[in-house]
Amino acid sequence: MERNLSEEKAMRIESAMIGVELAFNKLGIRKAGVSQRKAYRLYGEAKVKSWVCQELITPTKKGPLNSIVTYSLIDLDVLKSLDYEQN
């Protein structure tokens, strides 16, 4: 499948943005994860649950049974952009 120039530009910009996000996470400027509640609010509960069911993203817990469930912000952003491109 051939890509036109604007699609290639968009992909490169998206790749650069992901690199920036990774750098921000490593420097501690931006958190790497987001709570499940905030993920539902930012990306839509149905979308997040769909991505989990499709095993595109994995929820993590860092404690006992009632600890906060978190998701990777980078994974959520990438999935959102991919979902946007498909629609």
Image (spheres, grey):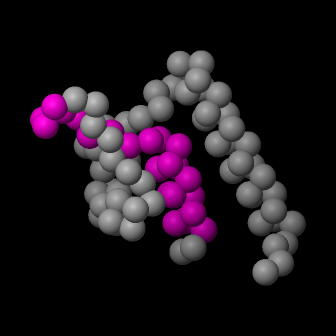
In the image, what residue occupies the spot 58% across and 23% down? Answer: 26
Q: Where is residue 32 in the image (x, y as percent from the top left)?
A: 47, 32
In the image: residue 14, left or right of residue 76: right
Is residue 71 in the magenta section?
yes
User: Which residue appears farthest toward the right when viewing the image?
Assistant: 5
| Quadrant occupied by the N terminus | bottom right
- Give the residues in magenta: 64-85
Q: x, y percentage for residue 56?
A: 45, 60
Residue 11 seen in render: yes
**Residue 81 sits inside the magenta stretch:** yes
Q: Hey, which residue is sitting farthest front in the picture?
A: 64
Hey, which quadrant is residue 54 in on the image? bottom left
Residue at the limit of the structure toward the left, as seen here: 66
Q: How many labels does the image show?
A: 0
Pinpoint residue 67: horizontal percent, then vertical percent: 18, 32
Residue 47 visible in this rendered orientation of the protein: no
In the drawing, does residue 69 fall left or right of residue 65? right
Residue 43 versus residue 26: which sits nearer the camera? 26
Q: In this view, does 71 lie above or below 25?
A: below
Residue placed at 22% from the left, 29% from the top? 63
Q: Examine the rendered structure and indicate whether residue 58 appears above or below residue 64.
A: below
Residue 62 screen position, x and y as percent:
28, 31
Q: Which residue is drawn at 81% across and 57% down?
A: 9
**Is residue 34 left or right of 31 when viewed as pictured?**
left
Residue 19 found in image quarter = top right
Residue shown at the point (61%, 35%) measured from the top left:
21
Q: Can you say which quadrant of the picture contains the C terminus? A: bottom right
The quadrant holding residue 72 is top left
